[in-house]
Image (tube, rainbow, N blue to C red):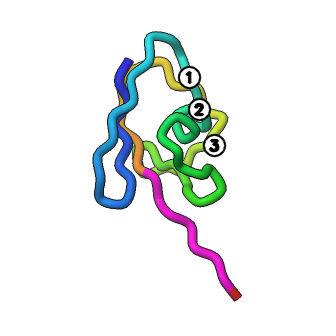
Amino acid sequence: MRVEVIYENDNLIFESESPTTISSILTELDIPSSTVLAVFNDTIVPHSSIINEDLKIELVVVSSGG
């Protein structure tokens, strides 16, 4: 399966032969999970979501501050 990840204006590709989670993809791409929201079809999805087919997700950077 192939997952296209849109992150900070870059298109990253993640490939896997077995189902995986968004969290695992973030780890493999060295993206800290606490810094992004995952969006699929205009809906925020949990990082625990299991992916088992080709798809495209967008990562929205979360900013915090005081």
The quarter of the image holding the N terminus is: top left
Q: Residue furthest top?
A: 17
Q: Nearer the viewer, mark 3 or mark 1?
A: 1
Disc 1 target residue: 20
Residue at the spot 60% in from the left edge and 52% down from the top edge = 32
Work out whether mark 3 precedes mark 1 in sequence or the reverse, and give the earlier one: 1
Q: Quadrant of residue 13?
A: top left
Mark 3 and mark 1: Cα distance apart in space: 13 Å
Image location (x, y in percent) of residue 28: 52, 34
Direction from residue 28 to residue 4 in the image, left or right: left
Tell me which residue sits at (59%, 60%) in the image.
35
Cα distance, mark 2 to mark 1? 6 Å
**Residues tagged 2 and 1 counted as in contact (Cβ below 8 A):** yes
- Secondary structure of the residue carrying numbered label 1: strand
Neighbor class of circle 3 (other Cα within 10 Å; few <14, some 14-19, many 20+) is few
Tell me which segment is drawn in magenta.
59-65
Q: Is residue 65 left or right of residue 36?
A: right
Amino acid under label 2?
Answer: Ser
Q: Amino acid at mark 3?
A: Pro
Q: Is residue 37 above or below residue 53?
A: below
Mark 3 vs mark 2, CA separation in Å: 12 Å
Residue indicated by mark 2: 24
Instruction: Give the camera-side residue of 11 and 48.
Output: 11
Q: Which mark is residue 46?
A: 3
